[in-house]
Amino acid sequence: ADEVGLGKTIEAGILIKEFLITGLAKKILILAPPSLIYQWQDELESKFNLSFTKKDDPSFIDASSHELLIFSHSGAVYENQKRLLMNVDWDMVVIDEAHSLKNPETLKYKLVKSLSKKYILLLTATPIQNNLLELFSLIDLIRPGMLGTKTQFKNKYADDPAMRKVNPLFKDDLQDILSKLMVRTTRQQVKKYIKFTDRNPVTKILTPTENETLLYNRITDKIRELFEGSNVGIFLMNTQKYISSSTSSTKLALKRMYENKLLDTNEFQELLTLANKIKIDTKTKELLNIIKLQKNEKFLIFTEYRSTQNYLYEILTKNGYFVEIFNGSMNLQERQEVVQRFKNNAQILIATSAGGEGQNFQFCNNIVNYDLPWNPMKVEQRIGRVHRIGQLKDVNVFNLAYQKTIDAYILEL
């Protein structure tokens, strides 16, 4: 559970090599997010001289026919693959980005739980993202029953019903158990022998134009009018997040509201006309200024929505920048090619959350959070893409938000 960018993949490689050489393991399965399969294969080949097979290799036969196998999380849960993987007695199973197993009800969790395995290694920089139950789920994969049942764990270690706080009476007890199962190295601990560059956060709370403010407020008022009382919360927050991202994502939100009969034709046309008056977003102007000030530097821009990603691609390309996009709809090869083009030629990569985990972008030292995820752990994952071992420059983190919007409120929190 080392912090982001400290080399968990390499540590796993050292363990895998050790287990193979000493004969403790012969059959090893690595489960990783689709976007990291190539990276895993390359790291193990180039640094440890280990040839792992992945599904799209010409030599691939099936999921049960290889002693050293890398498979994607999502590919492994398909019924035919799952059946084959479960037929093998694995000596070691390695799970990358293991926080994705936090929910025991998912197919992924159930598969990992039921695999035949002697040893299991979980890798995640963010073992808790929301509450203690996630930690319980991960530990239960390593040592089933060590923390008791879910109810026993909750009653003993949680100090609130949502399980967001540790009971102070049993904090040391929990840490003692975790110390037997978890290795967590922090940047602070390794600073004495690894030099990390500085991280410079720059937060820009922007004043929207009159039309942007009017559009945001009118959609907000409409939702409050439609959902009076307690039902308004989540729907309003999600829509506000959409409409504070970009005018492009706002138009999409309006279209969905219209299709779901939350707006009549007149209201829809009126709000769409107002949206069309906004030719370029204030956030986009600020982004262009930031890039212009460092015209030869590379930028990694994160947005929450595909519609905003496409809008930014169009604007930045029109302004003469060489831009690539990275998102969850791309297959493994497309993602790999995008990363290479960003490294070699492109100045800007615009990524959705798919680019926020596991990728190595040490050759870039500017991150823009064009939209902010609600979970600070996800922000840390994003920054960790560039602020990691091998980064030679100080890292600039630009956070953009409109004043008096949900993004500004999230930033404040």
Image (cartoon, rainbow, N blue to C red):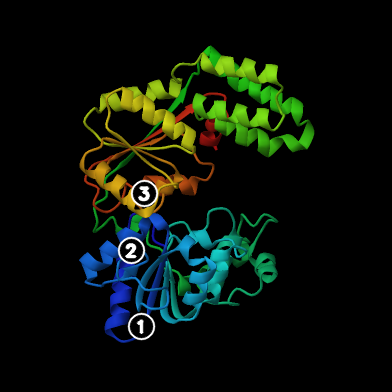
Q: Residues within 10 Å of mark 3 (few under 14, many from 20)?
A: many
- In depth, the one of 69 and 210 nearer the eye is 69
Q: Nearer the viewer, mark 2 or mark 3?
A: 2
Residue at mark 2 to residue at mark 1: CA–CA distance: 18 Å
- Which numbered dot is residue 25? 1
Q: Residue furthest bottom?
A: 23
Residue at image point 67% right, 31% down: 259
Residue at image point 38% right, 45% down: 383
- Which numbered dot is residue 384? 3
- Asked if disc 2 and disc 1 are in contact, CB closer than 8 Å, the reply is no
Which three-letter amino acid code belongs to the residue tagged 1?
Ala
- Which numbered dot is residue 144? none
Which three-letter amino acid code belongs to the residue tagged 3?
Gly
Vertical comparison of 382 with 315: above or below: below
If you read the primary sequence from the N terminus, does the residue marked by circle 2 or circle 3 appear first? 2
Q: Nearer the viewer, mark 3 or mark 1?
A: 1
* Residue hosting label 2: 9
Quadrant including the C terminus: top right
Element under label 3? loop
